[in-house]
Amino acid sequence: MTKAFDAFERAIRDAEQLLARYDAEKSASNGHNGEVLKRAGLVMALAAWETYVKDRIHSEIDTWLQAVDGSPIGKFVRRRLEEDLKRFFNPNSERTRRIFIEYFDTDITKDWVWDNYDSSTSKKALDALIAKRGDAAHKANTAAHSSAEPHKVKREELEKGIRFLKGLVAATEKAKITK
């Protein structure tokens, strides 16, 4: 496994811990509403995915540029990559596919196959999670009573999303990028 995978495993634990905290809050009769923990858990899970993608790209570019490291061409590619990664956020399927094609001439999404997912369903599931994350992160609950609006992130959705991202990262790990 790559260093990017190891970092993802550590980062995804934040989302898992928030889900566990939500469960503990829900079962406790302390009057706290733990709904914010589910939204935060989704944001953290997708931050783990974004970090994984960026780390994996860095790892692969290090391998690709070994022969030209320090040269003007190597410096140019690294500078361009850093500029591109500064604008690389919310890595949905198309953004992720595009950056891997641009730098490695590889459609990484073709390798997103595992269990009950093929490439197409993986892309749709990732894009749906990214959209839900946007809603959870950028649309505050402004209802006078916290129970007046339906919850943006359901517990089962967060649990399934974490499981999905773990599978997606494992499938991406199997992808042969460096030729």
Image: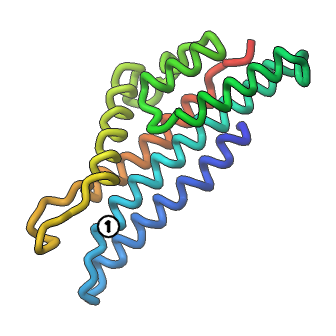
Name the residue located 59 percent from the left edge and 28 percent from the top edge. Answer: 84
Name the residue located 33 percent from the left edge and 61 percent from the top edge. Answer: 38
Q: Foreground: 1 or 100?
A: 100
Direction from residue 135 to residue 179 in the image, left or right: right
Query: x, y (%) of residue 52?
Result: 60, 40
Q: In which quadrant will I find the C terminus?
A: top right
Check disc 1: other Cα within 10 Å, few if <14, some if 14-19, many if 20+.
some
Name the residue located 36 percent from the left edge and 67 percent from the top edge. Answer: 37
Residue type pointed to by label 1: Val
Q: Which residue is mark 1?
A: 36
Q: Would you identify the image quadrant in which residue 23 lies?
A: bottom left
For residue 177, above or below residue 1: above
Name the residue located 22 percent from the left edge and 55 percent from the top edge. Answer: 152
For residue 177, above or below residue 171: above
Direction from residue 155 to residue 96 in the image, left or right: right
Query: x, y (%) of residue 173?
Result: 62, 31
Q: Foreground: 168 or 45?
A: 45
Direction from residue 43 to residue 49 in the image, left or right: right
Q: Foreground: 105 or 137?
A: 137
Query: x, y (%) of residue 83?
Result: 63, 30
Q: In which quadrant will I find the N terminus?
A: top right
Q: Would you identify the image quadrant in which residue 24 lies?
A: bottom left
For residue 29, above or below residue 166: below
Indicate the secondary structure of the residue bearing disc 1. Answer: helix
For residue 48, above or below residue 18: above
Query: x, y (%) of residue 26?
Result: 28, 76
Direction from residue 103 to residue 31 in the image, left or right: left
